[in-house]
Amino acid sequence: MKDFIITQVKSEEAVLVGLITRTQTEEQVKEYLDELDFLSETAGVRPVKRFIQKLDAAHPVTFVGKGKLEEIRLYVEEHEIGLVIFDDELSPKQLRNIEQTLKVKILDRTSLILDIFASRAQTAYAKTQVELAQYHYMLPRLTRLWTHLERQRGGVGMRGPGETQLETDKRIIQDRIAHLKEELKAIDKQMSVQRKNRGKMVRVALVGYTNVGKSTLMNVLAKSEVFAENKLFATLDTTVRKVIVHNLPFLLSDTVGFIRKLPTELVESFKSTLDEVREADLLLHVVDVSHPNFEEQIDIVNTTLREINGSEDKPMLLIFNKVDAFTFEAKDEDDLSPRTRRNVSMQELQETWMAKMQGDCLFISARESVGLDELKQLLYDRVREIHVTRFPYNDFLFQDYALEGDEPTV
């Protein structure tokens, strides 16, 4: 059965398709397709063409209009493209009709992300979560995966109404989903015991959009070798490391990154992974300040945190990473067009966000080691406040170090 789950996408050329609608502007669609392009490259696909259409809403039968679908078909045939990727989740009806017209492999944003998660999952826990999400996604789409589904089982003992092959396949998958849920419950219990065994040490969790540099920052602070790469979802498994700033120990965890239009199946499957976030005492929200729409990414992360019970009101430090990649385009005096995000200087950003966060934010570069001393100092101060509240009899230890005037170091 697993052979049907993971889509093998290797060194393929693909066409990307997006829609401008009442809820998605042209600028947003271009940015979403840039992200879809990055997702495709992460999965081993090389996008060669983009098709964008403006509609009030996605066509319920073919997603795009029939004329645009025919345009895509002609391009695919002429250039011998074997894969078309749509930027939104397609319904089973849309998938079936699009495949019948284009006669090539069709992926939507959800199936592409699921494929990346399947290839990136390393631990049994992550693999089980991804497999569960894949089965949830597959269940309503069975009719396009097998050609034998209309046939009815016959033979001795099967006369009469019998049971269609489609019903059999659905029952098998539903049984598998129930089995995977039981496996996750058992693993959740084990991980819960592990968290309890860590005692009452202060816990700090790294959260943020995917590919903002959380794992790189984790490596710098914990002096560890967590896998970090300039690709989306380089890290799926939660990693926990003990960090000591000066003489103050705490636990630092790196979690899976968030993304816009994250498949519902994955949100549900990975909620247990985010227990580290739910049980953290302090959150480090890492932001890619070089991204043109980092404010939207901040909102997406905050929305996701609100969906995790008890995570939206936790103390949080906003860490703007990748200042080394930040670009600024100064406007000419005679340019009367409205300013965009690219026309805002780093100094303006710092002043704005420092005032908004009341000082609980920093601008750093984990890769170039810019601002890390300030980050360690801020971490030391915040973790110490939590630690002293939890262990008031240890306060004299930190007062002695404060009198020495030494800066905390990792």
Image: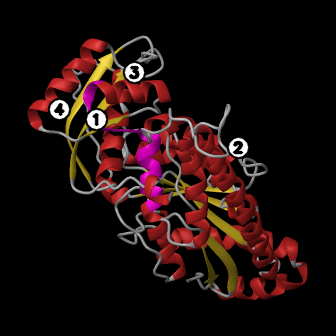
**Front: mark 4 or 2:** 4
Disc 2 on helix, strand or loop? helix
Q: Three-letter amino acid code at disc 3? A: Phe
| Residue linked to disc 2 | 307
The residue that appears at 40% across and 55% down in the rendered structure is 232
Find residue 16 and name its label.
1
Precedes in sequence: disc 1 or disc 3: 1
Which of the pair 168/217 is nearer the observer? Answer: 168
Mark 1 belongs to which amino acid? Leu
Q: Is residue 257 left or right of residue 27?
A: right
Q: Residue at x 69, y 64 (%)?
A: 276
Question: In which quadrant of the rendered view does residue 253 lie?
Answer: bottom right
Q: Is residue 330 left or right of residue 126?
A: left
* Closer to the eye: label 1 or 2: 1
Residue highlighted by disc 3? 63
Distance (Cα) linking label 3 and label 2: 29 Å
